[in-house]
Image: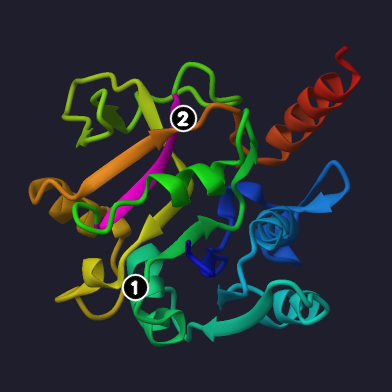
Amino acid sequence: MPRVAMVLAAGLGTRMRPLTETRPKPLIEVAGRALIDRVLDRFAEFGVDRAVVNLHHHRQVLEAHLRGRAHPRIVFSPEAELLETGGGVAQALPLLGPDPFFVANADVLWLDGRRPALQRLAAAWDDSKMDALLLVHSAITAQGYSGPGDYFVDPLGRMRRRRFGEIAPYIFGGVQVLHPRLLRDAPSGKFSLNLLWDRAQDADRLWAIVNDGLWFHVGTPDDIVRTEAELGWIRKAP
């Protein structure tokens, strides 16, 4: 059971402007709660002891906000320049330890299904055959998403990235479990986790579980309005 997590929170949030001109995107509130606090709340409920958060855009604002949290304990990984998702995790690796760990985007917003998604990820992890285990969601039911999808997933959970011209049924849901060995021989500097996922796919060590709850794309100010309306309807439903 992973007891350490990383939250990717260094991005510029350009599509969320003008809201991100004075604060980082993870501090944008949806239905009265900052996006990053929603993610950290999930980790605290699961029992994560330590969460590493990378910082860059409006670093001081985010750092000041998170210093008030006791659970999980927050450790900061500041980035002088943006390292992207893979570079951010690689830099933070000494803080994450030798065991599998969670990684979540700071702006992901999901509602659990019958079992919490983090519990399902932890239960599905098989160290003998996995280097990465991704939470994916149906591209059709993802609230606010209209793209061609990211991945195909077979009945056992093996993943294949969508090729040019294909329409894939699943999107990456912004939450995953990674083993430190995935970052062995990783490039220096900035790079995307997509590079390492492709390596894991080629080695048959990239796997997925499908989210059975709800998932919301919150990328623009208009998305906030739509998501809050959806959440309000869900709360009122019998």
Instruction: Check disc 2: other Cα within 10 Å, few if <14, some if 14-19, many if 20+.
Output: many
Q: Nearer the viewer, residue 23 or 202?
A: 202
- Residue drawn at the location 74% of the way across and 72% of the way down: 71
* Badge 1 or badge 2: first in the primary sequence: 1
- Residue drawn at the location 27% of the way across and 28% of the way down: 153
Q: Amino acid at mark 1?
A: Gly
Disc nearest the viewer among 1 and 2:
2
Q: Secondary structure at mark 1?
A: helix
Q: Is residue 57 left or right of residue 170?
A: right
- Residue drawn at the location 61% of the way across and 67% of the way down: 48
Please tell me whether residue 150 belongs to the stretch shown in magenta: no
Which disc, if any, is residue 87?
Answer: 1
Q: Nearer the viewer, residue 163 or 16?
A: 163
* Real-space Cα separation, disc 1 to disc 2, in angstroms: 25 Å
Please tell me whether residue 136 belongs to the stretch shown in magenta: yes
Main SS, magenta region, reads strand
Which disc, if any, is residue 152?
Answer: none
Q: Is residue 70 left or right of residue 125?
A: right
Return the residue found at the far top: 238
